[in-house]
Image (cartoon, rainbow, N blue to C red):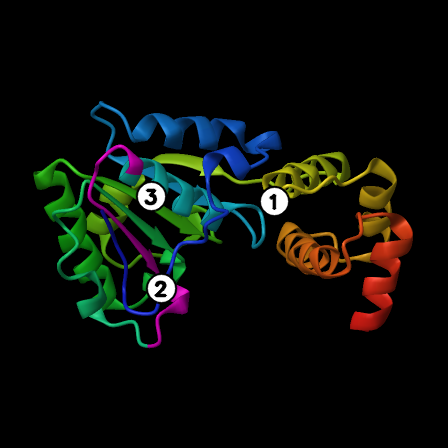
Amino acid sequence: MQQLPLGITLRDSARFVTFWPGPNAGAMDYLARLTGPGTDMGAWLWGPAAVGKTHLLQAVCSAADQAGQDTGYLPLASLSAVGPGVFEGWGVRDLLAVDDVDLVAGRADLERALFRLYNELAEHGGRLVISSVAAPGALSLGLADLASRLGALVVFQMQALDDAGMVDALRLRARGRGLELPDDTARFLMRRLPRDMASLCGWLDRFDMASLSAQRRLTVPFVREVLQTAR
């Protein structure tokens, strides 16, 4: 059963089946296997914002939960006050995902707390999946033992989708919501909206609500109307 800090929820859309992997297929495949039997300790995903790190961390938690495992998800950047206590009590999980581990670097109290948590998970036989913007070698962890432990995780550099991949990802998300996103509409959105998946998916959610209300399909004229109204 998933354990989450107060006020934190997993997105219903954050599943492996709703993730268009593109150049990140290796990371997705590895995390999917991580929920099964094996001896690997876990994975470290790093890369810029809006490349799918949070989606995959939440997806692996959901998949492990469906497999009957005890999981947890800690998005450090979303917690109001990150102190050493945020890592207490999670060491008996079968799988724990820690988002935004960059926030730990340079804070001795947090580094020691995460080091203890890693050891507790290892003793329990649990897996750890973390994410960061910085590459592992650039994270500047002050605690050498922690850097050594985290360095044992399998590392994946997450990469942004190209334009064709973004269109495919949008169409996959639309199908998941029971929508048809025609090619011409997808190309129109790529020309008019910010070219990052977080923004594009946010707008797709708005178009979904508007189409349900108006009982209209996602044609170019309709999404143009929605954009004009929103702006």
Distance, label 2 to label 1, CA atoms, is: 23 Å
Q: Judge from the rendering whether residue 191 lies leftward or rightward of residue 96; answer left or right.
A: right
Q: Which residue is mark 3?
A: 61
Q: Quadrant of residue 172?
A: top right
Q: Element at badge 2?
A: loop
Q: Judge from the rendering whether residue 39 lies leftward or rightward of residue 24; answer left or right.
A: left
Distance, label 1 to label 3, CA atoms, is: 21 Å
Q: Element at badge 3?
A: helix
Mark 1: amino acid:
Arg
Image disc number at residue 4: none
Instruction: Residue at 18%, 48% (x, y): give it.
Output: 118
Q: Which residues are magenta?
A: 66-80
Q: Element at badge 1?
A: loop
Query: Residue 212: x and y, percent?
Result: 70, 56
Q: Which residue is mark 2?
A: 8
Mark 3: amino acid:
Cys
Instruction: Residue at 22%, 23% (x, y): give it.
Output: 37
Q: Judge from the rendering whether residue 176 lies leftward or rightward of residue 53; answer left or right.
A: right
User: How many numbered circles does the render carry?
Assistant: 3
Res 187 visible: yes
Q: Quadrant of residue 186?
A: top right
Q: Which residue is mark 1?
A: 177
Query: Residue 145: x and y, percent?
Result: 19, 49
